[in-house]
Image: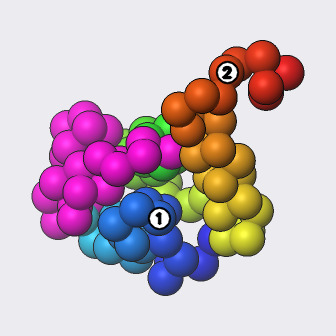
């Protein structure tokens, strides 16, 4: 994922914005990343990825997501389909 690709697709929060937020605000816990333009507060697909970015940053690494934006968006679309009312866990097995 490039730094201008969106991690939070609901609120269009890019990897670049999240990196700048981490550097500037130094959040103690991953949930504080929601203060960065609402990241993770929409469909919540990106929450595990936000946690990963926070962990990398806390360990002194450059936050990265080694996934293509196309694959990321497709996986989110699949996730959202499973979250729709009327769908069940049986549909995903």
Q: Quadrant of the C terminus?
A: top right
Direction from residue 49 to residue 92 in the image, left or right: right
Q: Magenta stretch: residue 29 in it?
A: yes
Residue in the picture at 73% in, 71% down? 70
In this figure, which residue is indicated by the disc labeled 2? 88
Q: Residue at x 49, y 82 (%)?
A: 4
Q: Dot 1, crowdedness within 10 Å: few (<14), some or many (≥20)?
A: some
26 in relation to 12, above or below: above
Residue under numbered circle 1? 9
The image quarter in which residue 69 lies: bottom right
Q: Position of residue 51 (x, y in %)?
A: 43, 39
Residue appearing at x 42%, y 46% in the figure: 43
The residue stretch that appears in magenta: 22-45
User: Could you tell which of marks 1 and 2 lies nearer the N-terminus?
Assistant: 1
Q: Is residue 4 magenta?
A: no
Distance of label 1 from label 2 (alpha carbons): 23 Å
Looking at the picture, tell me which residue is in the foreground, 34 or 3.
34
Observer-nearest residue: 35 or 43?
Answer: 43
Q: In this rendering, is residue 81 above or below 25? A: above
Quadrant the N terminus occupies: bottom right
Numbered marks: total: 2
Q: Tell me where residue 79 appears, x and y as whole percent.
A: 63, 42
Of all residues shown, which one is farthest toward the front? Answer: 86
């Amino acid at each position: 994922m490039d730094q201008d690709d969106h991690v939070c697709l609901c609120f269009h929060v890019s990897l670049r914005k999240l990196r700048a937020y981490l550097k500037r605000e130094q959040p103690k816990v991953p949930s504080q990343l929601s203060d960065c333009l609402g990241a993770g507060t929409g469909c919540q697909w990106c929450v595990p990825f936000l946690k990963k970015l926070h962990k990398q940053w806390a360990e002194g690494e450059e936050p990265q997501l080694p996934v293509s934006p196309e694959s990321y968006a497709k996986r989110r679309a699949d996730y959202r389909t499973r979250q729709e009312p009327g769908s069940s866990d049986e549909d995903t097995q």
